[in-house]
Amino acid sequence: MAEDVYVGNAGVDAAGDRGWLLGHFKPVGDVRHSEDVEIKWGVHPRGDERARWVTGESRTALLLLISGRFRVELPGRSVLLAERGDYVVWGRGVDHSWYAEEESVVLTVRWPSVPGYAVPGYAVPGHAVPGRDADG
């Protein structure tokens, strides 16, 4: 069934939806629509940072470094991802933020996929999507 297959490029597809490739925010009927998991291809210039901490987290997340140096801030702990393949996992209830120490590419997987967590007024230059989840 062709409608159950999607072939794309993370760099191209991510640019049109703030990095998000799969999750509840994709149209129902699209094979990339999921309420179980979200996947993001995050490309962050040096100095890019989350506008504010995510609090009241209700998902589990994995953040995997593809390239660059990327810091994840957790309560009482700062985790530096510096080698390709470094990753961090945090569970429900763990607040977080992040900072790109160098230009970085990260893959984020979160589950379940739930609405919310958007930073009001957050916009990637040229990719403003009102109300869309912007964190990683």
Image (cartoon, rainbow, N blue to C red):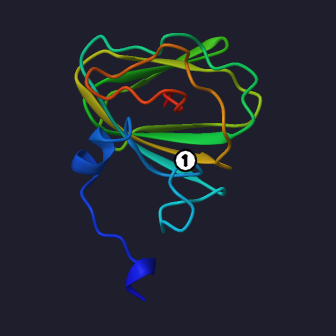
Q: Which of these two is toward me, 37 or 130?
A: 130
- Residue 48, how many percent across, how many down? 33, 15
Count numbered badges in the picture. 1
Residue 28 seen in the figure: yes
Crowd band around label 1 with a 10 angstrom C-alpha radius: few (<14), some (14–19), many (20+): some
> Is residue 127 toward the left or the right of residue 89 in the image?
left
Is 59 situated above or below 77?
below
- Residue 93, how many percent across, how many down? 77, 29
Q: Secondary structure at mark 1?
A: loop
- Residue 80, how many percent across, how many down? 42, 22
Residue at horizontal 49%, vertical 13%?
A: 121
Residue at horizontal 63%, vertical 20%?
A: 54
Q: Which of these two is toward me, 43 or 83?
A: 43
Residue at horizontal 32%, vertical 44%?
A: 14
- Which residue is identified by label 1? 25
Give the farthest residue toward the bottom. 1
> Is residue 94 toward the left or the right of residue 99 in the image?
right
Is 117 situated above or below 21?
above
Q: Which of these two is toward me, 98 or 5?
A: 5
Going by the numbered disc 1, the residue's amino acid type is Phe
Residue 84 seen in the figure: no
Q: Which of these two is toward me, 11 or 105?
A: 11
Quadrant assignment, res 104: top left
Q: Quadrant of the N terminus?
A: bottom left
Residue at horizontal 48%, vertical 69%?
A: 31
Quadrant assignment, res 42: top left
